[in-house]
Image: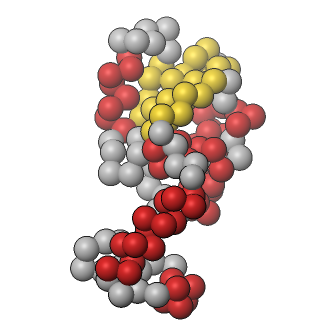
Amino acid sequence: MAEKALIYIHGKGGTAAASEYFQQLFPEYDTFGFDYKAENPWEAEVEYKGYFTKLSKEYSYITVIASSLGAYFLMIAGVSDMIQKAFLVSPIVDMVSTGFILMSKLNIEKIGLTNISNAMTIRTNKFVY
C-alpha cells in the first residue's frame, strides 16, 4: 500500500488536469485529479463513494483539495472516514442564496416550481438545471 495521495476535485466546468499544479507543492504525495461526472448530489454520493473506497485500499493517507461544487459534493458524499485532511475552497454552503440565484434564472426562462418538481433535469435556451 502506498502512503500518501493528494486528490484535487474541480468545481463545475473545471478540469482534473489542474491537479498538476499541486504536484510541486506536495512532492511527497501521489497527486490525482478526480474528474467527477455527477450532475446532482445523489449521483455524486455514489460516484464519490466508489472513487474514495477504491483509493482508500491503495493509500493509507488521503488529502483532498476541492473547489466549489466539487467541495459541496465531497461534504455530502459520506466519505469523510476515508479522508485524513481536506481543504475546501468556496464550497456551496449557503443553499438559500444559491436557491435564490437559481430561481431568478428560472424566472427569466419562465420556468415555475411545478416544472421543477415534475422533472429531474430542465433544459432551457440559456441554462441547464
State the residue at coordinates (49%, 8%).
28
Residue 6 pos. (x, y %) = 51, 24
User: Residue pushed farthest left?
Assistant: 125
> As drawn, is 12 to the left or to the right of 78?
left
Whether residue 58 is visible to the viewer of this picture, yes or no, is no
Whether residue 18 is visible to the viewer of this picture, yes or no, is yes
- Classify 80 as above or below 29: below
- Classify 84 as above or below 117: above
Residue 45 pos. (x, y %) = 63, 55
Number of marks in the rendered image? 0
Q: Residue 31's quadrant in the figure?
A: top left
Q: Residue 10's quadrant in the figure?
A: top left
User: Residue pushed farthest top?
Assistant: 28
- Classify 38 as above or below 88: below
Q: Residue 2's quadrant in the figure?
A: top right
State the residue at coordinates (40%, 86%).
111
Residue 96 pos. (x, y %) = 57, 61
- Classify 56 as above or below 41: above
**Near-viewer residue (16 or 51):** 16
Q: Quadrant of the C terminus?
A: bottom left
User: Residue pushed farthest right?
Assistant: 81
Q: In the rendered view, how is the structure colored?
A: secondary structure
**Near-viewer residue (63 or 124):** 124
Residue 41 pos. (x, y %) = 58, 60
**Near-viewer residue (103 or 15):** 103
State the residue at coordinates (59%, 28%).
86
> As drawn, is 65 to the left or to the right of 60?
left
**Near-viewer residue (110 or 40):** 110
Q: Quadrant of the N terminus?
A: top right
State the residue at coordinates (31%, 34%).
17
